[in-house]
Image (spheres, rainbow, N blue to C red):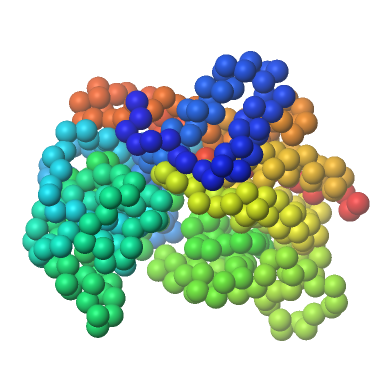
Amino acid sequence: MSFFPKISFQCEVEEYLTKVFRNNELITALGTQEAESKYQSLLSRLSHPPGFTTVRVNTHLISVKHVKKLLFEEIQKQFKGLCVPVLEHPKLQDILLIPVIGPRRDLKKHASEVIVGPHCGYAVLRGAHVYVPGIISTSRFMKAGDLVSVYSDIEGKCKRGAKEFEGVKVFLGNGISELSRSEIFSSSGPLNGMGIRMIEPVYLSPSFDNVLPSHLFLQNLPSVVVSHVLNPQPGERILDMCAAPGGKTTHLATLMHDQGEVIAMDKIANKVKKIKQNAELLQLNCIKAFCYDGTKALSVEKRENEQEGPPFLPESFDRILLDAPCSGMGQRPNMAYSSTLKEVTSYQPLQRKLFTVAVKLLKLGGILVYSTCTITLSENEEQVAWALKSFPCLQLQPQEPHIGGEGMRGAGLSLDQLKLLQRFDPSAVTLQGMDINSLQDSREDDLISLANKDCIGFFIAKFIKSTSK
């Protein structure tokens, strides 16, 4: 049952998506009614957070069992003795899953209100407290220590510093203000610290602020699956083409036991800095991060021997991960998607440029994994169809582990080809919510099965380069 309204799109984007999810291949296979039902279900799921928090353990430094024990104790402390399990995953042995309790429908709303921006709101729904930069507006007389109700301005229409807001807002839960209104909107410049400590969030997830920072990395479940599918081996040379903020980069290095070389690229300097910080925090030494545009990463001339960074010669890498820039429509929660149709459709040509460079940089016999966190055909299955046609040297490969569903119909791929793809589809699970009683009555196998489906929208394709065509 939905707690939040379905995700909203600009009209032209909504029309575009409706055509995608009512394409002829899909309608022929499922029938109009089932295709429409799945699409509406997807729109509902996207506005709600995933049912589990996924934590990847830095197995380079610590065992999963040890972190599981520490995390269980930390959650009990945060949840004041509430017994929420920490689950191991049978196929992803470096992650832990924590069920999310919610939505909690019986929370009392307070007169004093705080309005936060949409991105801050989504973070709160996944367990974060409210930090000052995310606060847009507060009630007129709010003081430090006040009980407040926190709302998200999902359409981004509230003016900073407003004393009241009558626009579209969504209730996120209750908290205690750490600062007064005048301190938050002080003219001496913005503060950075915590603004509201959430004590009764609508969705109860643990906060990971300074919790085992060198031992844990918060990641969505499909993002962990990607690195396992690439399956890097110690001593290999790996390229992560669009690597920020470094979750997959550091995972690849960990799977290689920090032996070999992981080259991480991103074209935004601040993001590259973040990759380096994460590598240092997790004590991984085989990562080399460069600020560079992946579309220009192929060198046509012989390079200086000393040059270790991009551009690179053809056939320089054993395995390549292209976690491509995308329209991001699979991210959850998202209640109002703001991009225009022009922005949504701009990603396909960029992804093809990056993919073309990746194929040239890959050694014969090498593995290329392509992934996105979106739900469109044009950025997923259509890209696979294009790649197989454009590069006869590429063949689709089975994926291990295969946890998501098969690819979506509509791009002209055969059923056998669709079975080799992984599409994580949030509509595959019923939106039911979780309370502490239903959690305690659930079998662990059922919870794992639910976690595999109730995650973000995501897509993975795995290719091998077999001949030098």
Depth check: 73 or 143 in front?
Answer: 143
Work out which residue is located at the far right of the displayed protein and give it: 469
**Residue 260's quadrant in the figure?**
bottom right
In which image quadrant can residue 23 be found? top right
Residue depicted at 56% across the width and 23% down the height: 36
* Residue 129 spot, x, y in % from top left: 25, 56
Image location of residue 98, percent across then percent down: 32, 41
Q: Which of the two residues, 204 or 321, is positioned nearer the viewer here?
A: 204
For image coordinates 8% across by 61% down, the residue present is 145
Q: Is residue 342 left or right of residue 166?
A: right
Does residue 158 sit above or below 433 in this rendering?
A: below
The image shows residue 163 at horizontal and vertical percentages of 21, 61
Quarter containing the N terminus: top left
At x 76%, y 65%, the residue is: 316
Pick the front one: 308 or 137: 137
Q: Is residue 422 visible?
A: no
> What count of labels does the image hold?
0
Direction from residue 84 to residue 216 in the image, left or right: right
Residue reaching furthest front? 166
From what the image shows, is residue 134 above or below residue 11?
Answer: below
Q: Is 347 on the left-hand or right-hand side of 166?
A: right
Point out residue 115 in the picture as x, y percentages from the top left corner.
27, 56
Q: Is residue 406 left or right of residue 123?
A: right
Along the line of sight, the residue nearer the viewer: 82 or 144: 144
**Any part of residue 10 in sight:** yes
Residue drawn where x is 71% and y is 30% of the image: 410
